[in-house]
Image (cartoon, grey):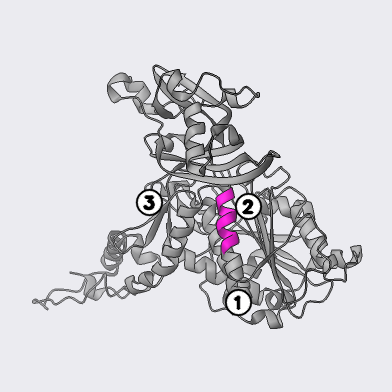
Amino acid sequence: FFCRSIPYPRPPSVFPPLRFPNRTMPPPSATMRMRVAVLLLRAAGAACLVAMPPISDIRAHVPLAEEAIRFFDASPDPFHVVRTSSRMLEAAGFEELDDKEPYAGRIFPGGKYYFTRNRSTLVAFAVGSKYVPGNGFKVIGGHTDTPVLKVKARSRRSSSGVTQLGVECYGGGLWHTWFDRDLGICGRVLVRSGEDGAIEQRLVRIDRALVRVSTLAIHLTTAKEREAFGFNNEDHLSPILAMAAKKALTGEKGREKDGWTEHQEPLLLQVLADELGLASVSEIADFELNLYDVQRAALGGVNSEFVHSARLDNHATCFVATKAIVTHAGSGLLEDDTDVSMITLFDHEEIGSSSAIGAGSPVMAESVERIAAALNGGASDADLTGAALRKSFVLSVDQAHAVHPNYAKKHESAHMPSMNGGIVIKRNSNQKYTTNGVTGLLVREVARRAGLRAPQEFMVRNDCGCGSTIGPIISTATGIRAVDVGMPQLSMHSCRETMGIADLTSGLDLFVAYFQNFRAADSSVEQ
C-alpha cells in the first residue's frame, strides 16, 4: 500500500493507481519506500526492464515471419537453401552468371546478377547505376550449412534385425536433440542418364518420417546413465530405416558391383529412385545426403511472437539477406547508388570455412576482383581493386545468443540480448569476432540514420568460450573491414531452435538500411 507514495517512475500497466480508505496513516519512511520499490521491480520481472514491442506491433511482424517459415521448410540443406534463394533472386530479375566464363561484357551498372559454387554457396550483387571503377562493395555475409547428421559414403548398416544407415556428425551439433525426432532425407543425388552416361545433379527431399534415432528405454538405463544421458556418436546415432528384409526382396542378387553401389543400403537407393522418378537404382551414381527434422517451422508463444524451427542458425540470415538485396535492388535506389551491393552465402562455416567454397576460399576476393575488372571495361587494375577493397565493408551475419531465462548467469551481466529486442552487435577483443570501435559504430550509425532502434550488444563472460564465424576469416583473406552481428535466438545448434519474429523485421530493416546508407555513414567517420 506504499506504492502511491513512491516517487519513482513506474510503468502504468504494472503499478495501477491505488485508493486508500484510511488517509490518516503516517507516510512511510524514505528507506521503506526504496525497499518496496525494489521488491515491486523484482516482482514485475524482466518484462518491466526490457523494452518489448506491444502485442499489436508483434502481430505486424507475422507476414514476414510466415514468409521466412516457408523458406525454412523448403531449405533443409545448403543445396536447397541456394535453390530457394536463387528462385527469389530470379523472380526479382537477377540474372544468373556462368562462373566459368569471363564477366567482361556481361556486367553493367544498374544490373542485378548472381552465381553459385558447388550449388551450395551463392553470391548475388546489384551494381549501382552511378558506380565508377574503384568504388566499394557493401557485403552481407552468411552461411548455408548447419550442424547435421550426414549419410556416410558407405551407408549400409544393420543390427539386431533392423536396417540402419551409417551417419557422420557434421559440425558441432547438440546431438542429444536428434534422438526421437521424425527425420527425413535430403541432399544431392548424381544421376547417370542417357545412352552417353552423362551425369546430372538432382536435388531430393523426402519429406516424411523415413528414419529415426531412438533413445534407450528408462528401464534399461542405470541411474548414472540417465543422469548424464551419455551416448557414443558412432554407436548410438545410427538411425533405423526399416526392419531387415529378405535379400531377395531388396534385389541383393545380381546387384551391380562398381565400388560404390554394393556398399549402399538397397532400401535407401530404392527410395531415392522412387522419389526422383528413376527407372532403376542403377541410374544413381553417387549422393550427398543429410538427415533433417521433418517437423514444420511454426509460430509459437501466446501472441505468436516466436519462430520455432530447425536450422535458424544460419538460414534466418540467408532468408533475410536475400530478401534485403531483392528489396534494395527493386526500390529504385540503385539509380543513385555508387557501390556494388552484395550478399555472400557460404557453405562449410560450421566446420571452419576452409574449403573451395567456404569463407576461407578465394570466392570473396575473386568476386571483388572479377566484378571490378568487368566494370572497368574488362581491364584488371590492381590499384583500382586495392582502392575498392579499402572502401568495402562486410556485415558478417550469424545468429547471436539471446539470454536464456533458465540460464541467465551464462551471460555477462551487461551484455544480455533478448529475443525480439533487435539485431545484436557481437564483440570479442581476441578477434573471434571482427567488431572494433569503428565498425561497431558504423552499424549504429546506419541504424540511427534510418531511424531504427539501436542494436543490442553481446560479449561472452571471461569464464566462457567464444564461438567464431566468417567475419575474421574474410577480413584475414581480403583485408576488407568487417563487423559481426546477428539476430538473437535460443537453442543454437539444436535440432530445433527458437527466435523472435520481430528480429526478422529488425534484421531486414537494418540490412536494407545498410545497403542504402552505408556510404554516407562511412564518409562521416574519420578513418
* Pointer 2 residue: 428
* Pointer 3 residue: 405
Foreground residue, 297 or 15?
297
- 2 or 3: tag closer to the N-terminus: 3
Which quadrant does the C terminus fall into? bottom right
- 1 or 2: tag closer to the N-terminus: 1
- 3 or 1: tag closer to the N-terminus: 1
For badge 1, the amino acid type reads Gly
Q: Is residue 464 at all visible to an observer of this figure?
A: no
How far apart are the two marked residues, 1 and 2, measured between alpha carbons?
Answer: 36 Å
Q: Residue furthest front?
A: 195
Labelled disc at residue 330? 1
Dot 3 and dot 1 residues touching (CB under 8 Å): no
Location of residue 51 in the rendering, given as x and y in whole percent from the top left corner? 40, 68
Q: Is residue 26 above or below residue 124?
A: below
Secondary element type, mark 3: loop
Labelled disc at residue 100? none
Foreground residue, 145 or 138?
145
Task: State the image quarter where residue 318 is shown.
Answer: bottom right
Q: Which residues are magenta?
A: 79-87
Q: Residues within 10 Å of mark 2 (few under 14, many from 20)?
A: some
Q: Residues within 10 Å of mark 1 (few under 14, many from 20)?
A: some
Dot 2 and dot 3 residues touching (CB under 8 Å): no
Q: Is residue 487 at all visible to an observer of this figure?
A: yes
Location of residue 280 in the rendering, given as x and y in whole percent from the top left corner? 54, 34
Secondary element type, mark 2: loop
The prevailing secondary structure element of the residues shown in magenta is helix
For badge 3, the amino acid type reads Pro
How far apart are the two marked residues, 3 and 1, measured between alpha carbons?
Answer: 40 Å
Q: Is residue 485 above or below residue 30?
A: above
Which quadrant does the N terminus fall into? bottom left
